Amino acid sequence: MTRAPLRRTATALTALTAALSLTACGVFGGGSADEADAGDGVITFWHYYGDPHGVPLEAMLERYTEETGVEVEPRFIPFEDFGRTLQQQAAAGGLPDVALVNAYETGQLADAGIIEDLSAYADAWGERDAYYDAGWETGQVDGATYGIPHLADDYALYYNEDALAAAGVAVPTTWDEMEAAAAAIADSGAASYGLAVSGIEGAEGATGILLRTLAAGGDLADFGGGAGTAALESFQRMTASGGLSEGFLTWNEDDAMAAFTNGEAAMAINSASAVNVVRENAPDLAWNVAPLPADATEATFLSAENLAIGAGSGDADAAWDLIEWMQQPSVLEEYLPERNKLPARSDVPGAVTDPVRAVFADQLENAWAPTGETALHSTEALTIVQQALQAVISGSATPADAAAEAQAAIDEAMGR
């Protein structure tokens, strides 16, 4: 089953933060200047896409070699080991020419001197305006470009058409309608509960409450005001009405989709990565997707990855040529459907011919992603937000108090 994007973000940030704290004061690249300038004509490319996700990526790299004659040597490193391996090889002078990194790690990697400043390449390329703002900003560090968006993903609302019809409710377009629909579905018996979403301990379990906070006009850095309180109150009401099972506090995103595909939940919040999961696990289910409900605004959460050049690469020009080629719309049109992802740029219509995925792609204009200091501390902040949610659902804190306490903890984590 496809691993959920938010879980990937949380795991990678935790591992990388621990690793970076050991040697973040150094400047990496390794080897002598002569070694760094030499190059061997082979582009090394590190990634963490295991099977089956690595198959289309490595096929893309093979296509590049066929078209250009330039050899690319991919290396798969398990996701949980990726940050540690980069750190170790930085110290040893063995960084790759190109690394595919989690978007929210870009700032940490840049601060540690593990990846190169790509500003000169990016400025000469002139493609910045083709990218969605949220994704592009994840590669910006102190006004410089350190990562080029590789692909994107975001969240939407999955719904069971038959269950909603049986309960006599329409697809919710606002969070008020979501609460009413979830309760009506549970009351009608059309499904055991109306909505499935991850609430598990840790950063992943903050997905739903973050999305609700974004809709209310807040974000991770501004959770303690009205937006965070409104989000917590909303989830409290849905749980009290039976529209949301109290068990969601033990669910990861895979569990939430399992509840949707087996018919226990009539709706679910998840990313575009789950589209194939539903198609494979519930081929007879009548379902569709819709944009996330709105409140003060429409918003979704961006999951993304960036392409970066390892510090001290002896083949920086060749590495950039590969990155630039990989981001051509014609290349992405072939690659992204196989990869089951969305384009990070808006001029790749051929990559989103599936009407279901088009709903996710349309929301990229409204996608939010942590940047700057918020990105550096996003795992801590998300974990704190989940703890606030748990406190409210358990009855140990009111929404207002939990939001205020969470804001104080977030401020402390960010050194504010």
Image (tube, rainbow, N blue to C red):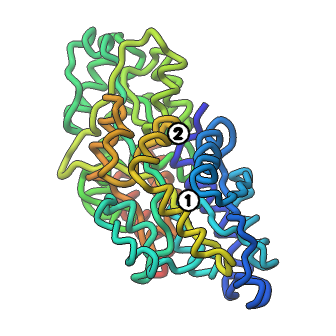
| Sequence order check, earlier mark of 1 and 2 | 1
Across and down, in percent, residue 92 comes to 82, 77
Across and down, in percent, residue 242 comes to 37, 25
Quadrant that contains the N terminus: top right
Amino acid identity at mark 2: Arg
Amino acid identity at mark 1: Asn
The residue drawn where x is 69% and y is 78% is 314
Across and down, in percent, residue 24 comes to 67, 82
- Where disc 2 sits, the SS reads helix
The residue drawn where x is 74% and y is 65% is 84
Q: Residues within 10 Å of mark 2 (few under 14, many from 20)?
A: some
Mark 2, residue position? 339
Mark 1, residue position? 102
- Of residues 265 and 236, the one drawn nearer to the viewer in this rendering: 265
291 in relation to 321, above or below = above
Q: Is residue 34 visible?
A: yes
Q: Is residue 92 left or right of residue 291?
A: right
376 in relation to 69, above or below = below
- Of residues 146 and 16, the one drawn nearer to the viewer in this rendering: 146
Front disc: 1 or 2: 2
Q: Which mark is residue 373?
A: none
